[in-house]
Amino acid sequence: MWGSLRPHINQQAQGKEVTDLDEIKNKLRQFALARDWDQFHSPKNLSMALAVEASELLERFQWLSEEQSNNLSVEQRKAVEEEMADVFLYLLRLADKLNINLLSAADDKISMNELKYPAEKVKGSSKKYTEY
Amino acid sequence: MWGSLRPHINQQAQGKEVTDLDEIKNKLRQFALARDWDQFHSPKNLSMALAVEASELLERFQWLSEEQSNNLSVEQRKAVEEEMADVFLYLLRLADKLNINLLSAADDKISMNELKYPAEKVKGSSKKYTEY
Amino acid sequence: MWGSLRPHINQQAQGKEVTDLDEIKNKLRQFALARDWDQFHSPKNLSMALAVEASELLERFQWLSEEQSNNLSVEQRKAVEEEMADVFLYLLRLADKLNINLLSAADDKISMNELKYPAEKVKGSSKKYTEY
Amino acid sequence: MWGSLRPHINQQAQGKEVTDLDEIKNKLRQFALARDWDQFHSPKNLSMALAVEASELLERFQWLSEEQSNNLSVEQRKAVEEEMADVFLYLLRLADKLNINLLSAADDKISMNELKYPAEKVKGSSKKYTEY
């Protein structure tokens, strides 16, 4: 009886994020499997695909001013969102292949950056910022 | 009594993912705020930073064979993990600035790709794959 | 009489390279001028455009094996050539804007690399190579 | 007598460009040969190395405003020049491996772009520009 209740509770526990990283990883794994594309998904190739998608995102901003990039039209924002999704998908696919936990890796990196760039030392100076 | 149990159950339900995307976004926001770096974080600039990090990931694989990329040493894997974390952090920072939900964007993109590349049509053919 | 001979001699002197870097730079300058696009060609923006083109080149190879990349079909080679031309054009445009002599910069860099990677020290070892 | 004059005239004809593209290609070929690095220089790998260098160039501009990128300090300009040289070297190395004539490919591409973007149609409009 408890067992049958738990899944329901779990779903509530995850709250707004119906989809989570593992669920997307699983979908991508099935996607590649169904197409027999896993053979192309070496980490080397996936790093290339990720870089290509990151540049497609870059392309959306290349001729915009910084101010324009802060005020995207609905169409521009939609296009940007799709490119960001592509970057994210390849990042998750690579994380799955290498068995890397992105969330904890990101969390660790923030802690490292806090040590590397002490707020009191680097605050407010673009000059200092660009030197890093 | 139930009430006091629920938080504990919830925490178990979420399992290993103590940190979630929103929590990382918040940390990054605080990080930029404390250093007065928000002024540099236009979407245009963030797209550049993201592309730079994606290429640092690419660099880790540039002289490896595909097979070697499937068999990274502990040190290589650690370096790759850190670069992936950097890509992820800028992706989340940009998502926060543009108020984009990465998880649902990724989920939508998978659905689009399933229509675009029907399994029965593209299965197993590298030729077909490379033509897309 | 001498005057009328000189241009002919000059042309022979340059040999197969009828077009040279300065000629391409000039054409690009005219191209931007005629379209009033110079306003978009800040070095920052040009570095983005160059990176975008470099990734379009990358895209041509992302799912090919190294061996396949050594044996491109006529169509693949043509596509690669066009992407390389795009990279080259933005590189020359940026060099023009910053008044940089690419040929001497490249020559200097080779000399620096010869000091940095002494042949007898790094020869033949992929392990050594990947460590750089 | 004519014969002895010609080389002098030729040298004047080529003007400042003592080094030309073929000379750099040859140096790069010798450089790779002496280190037994040709084995790593598949077109696939070279496209990755080129993209990595293009992003290192991008990195120099990522936190600069467009205006700042138009007014680089001596140190910044020197760093930019070196990254551009790296991009150029990998582009030439790849051109050599694929037996591609970069100058004529670039020249062809300009002609194609002139047809694709007629000056009278696209002139002066950033909106039009960004739509391409």
Image (cartoon, coloured by chain):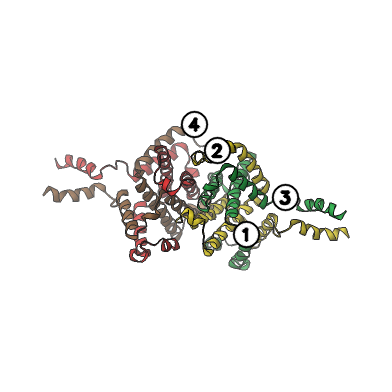
Chain colours: A yellow, B green, C brown, D red
> Is D116 positioned to the left or the right of C73 in the image?
left
Whether pointer 1 and pointer 3 mark residues with C-beta atoms closer than 8 Å, the reply is: no
The picture places residue D123, in percent across and down from the top left corner, at 35, 62
The picture places residue B106, in percent across and down from the top left corner, at 62, 59
| Amino acid type shown at disc 3 | Glu
The chain to which mark 3 is attached is B
Whether pointer 2 and pointer 4 mark residues with C-beta atoms closer than 8 Å, the reply is: no
Q: Picture quarter containing residue B76?
A: top right
Give the mark toward the camera: 2 or 1. Answer: 2
Residue picked out by circle 4: C121
Label 1 to label 4, Cα distance in Å? Answer: 47 Å
Label 1, residues with CA under 10 Å away: few <14, some 14-19, many ≥20: many
Whether pointer 1 and pointer 4 mark residues with C-beta atoms closer than 8 Å, the reply is: no
Residue picked out by circle 3: B17
The tag earlier along the polypeptide, 1 or 3, is 3
Say which element carries label 4: helix
Label 1 to label 3, Cα distance in Å? Answer: 18 Å
Instruction: Let me know if marks 1 and 4 both belong to one chain.
Output: no
- Which residue occupies 26% across, 48% down? C14
- Which residue occupies 59% across, 45% down? B33
The chain to which mark 1 is attached is B
The picture places residue B67, in percent across and down from the top left corner, at 60, 47
Residue picked out by circle 2: A122
The chain to which mark 2 is attached is A
Say which element carries label 3: loop
Residue picked out by circle 1: B106
Instruction: Let me know if marks 1 and 3 both belong to one chain.
Output: yes
The picture places residue D131, in percent across and down from the top left corner, at 45, 63
Of residues D10 and A18, the one nearer the viewer is: A18
